[in-house]
Image: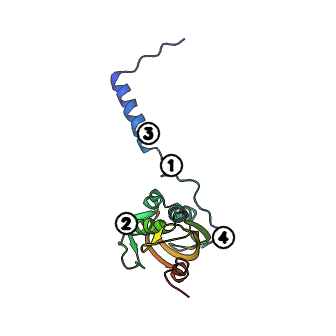
Amino acid sequence: MPFLPLPSRRDVGLAFAMATAAAVSAPTFAETPAPLPRPAHVVQDHSIGKSQRESMTLAARRYFAFWNTGDESYARLALSPDFVDRTLPAGRPQGFEGPLFASRNFRTAVPDLKAEVQEMMLVGDRVVGRLHFTGHYTGTFQGKAGSGQPVDFIATDIYRIANGRIAENWHLEDNLTLLQQLGVVHP
């Protein structure tokens, strides 16, 4: 059996530091979320390179996962630190905190909210998502308690992706249908 020298104290310290750094930098569940929502249908601009297409898809699917689950870690992975909401509703904070605020408030009314991605389109530096939201109004909205009635509405989001994250967002929700289902607006 060949003789193997014992590592020096410096070598042990260096190995420990490298192992610690690897453990700290190793992906966590939040950094590699799975499963992410899969769109039922995808349309892709074939002039977009594979790497960019994968980066855009990952950012969009992480954001879809945020809306589907309410888990803020998905939003933190999807949104750029300088994220801007270009269709900011009154009362919602601008930037990264806006979607978190909206999700928390919405889930107060509809705790079992789910988002299905009906279609995702990748064009240029944009991702367009057609989303279908469902759930039950079992919480409260504007001080009014729900009685379990179903919530079912659609939304369309447009994301501009930069450096693998959503830098800007334009969105349009069918708020009339939603407010009718919540009993706030009557047909």
- Look at the image and tell me whether residue 82 can be seen: no
Contact, mark 4 vs mark 2 (Cβ under 8 Å): no
Name which of mark 4 and mark 1 comes first in the sequence.
1
Q: According to the image, label 4 marks what residue?
A: 41
> Marks 3/4: CA distance?
37 Å
Foreground pick, 142 / 16:
142
- Residue at which label 3 appears: 23
From this view, report whether residue 57 is shown above or below residue 178.
above
Q: How is the image coloured?
A: rainbow
User: Residue 15: percent from the left, percent from the top?
Assistant: 40, 30
Sequence-earlier tag: 3 or 4? 3
Q: Return the x and y of residue 180 as percentages of the image width and height.
A: 54, 81
In the image, 100 versus 138, the foreground residue is 138
Label 2 and label 1: CA atoms lie apart by 22 Å
Q: Position of residue 48 (x, y in %)?
A: 56, 69
Q: Earlier in the sequence, mark 1 or mark 3?
A: 3
State which mark lies toward you, 3 or 2.
2
| Residue kind at label 3, given as amino acid type | Ala
Q: Quadrant of the N terminus?
A: top right
Marks 1 and 3, how far apart in space?
Answer: 13 Å
Q: Position of residue 102 (x, y in %)?
A: 43, 69
Return the residue at label 2: 97
Q: Is residue 104 left or right of residue 39?
A: left
Identify the residue position indicated by label 1 in the image.
29
- Examine the rendered structure and indicate whether residue 185 appears above or below residue 17: below
Q: Amino acid at mark 2?
A: Glu
Secondary structure at badge 4 equals loop
Spatial CA span between label 4 and label 2: 30 Å
Q: Foreground: 72 or 91?
A: 91
**Residue found farthest to the right:** 40
> Taking 35 as reference, is 169 above or below it?
below
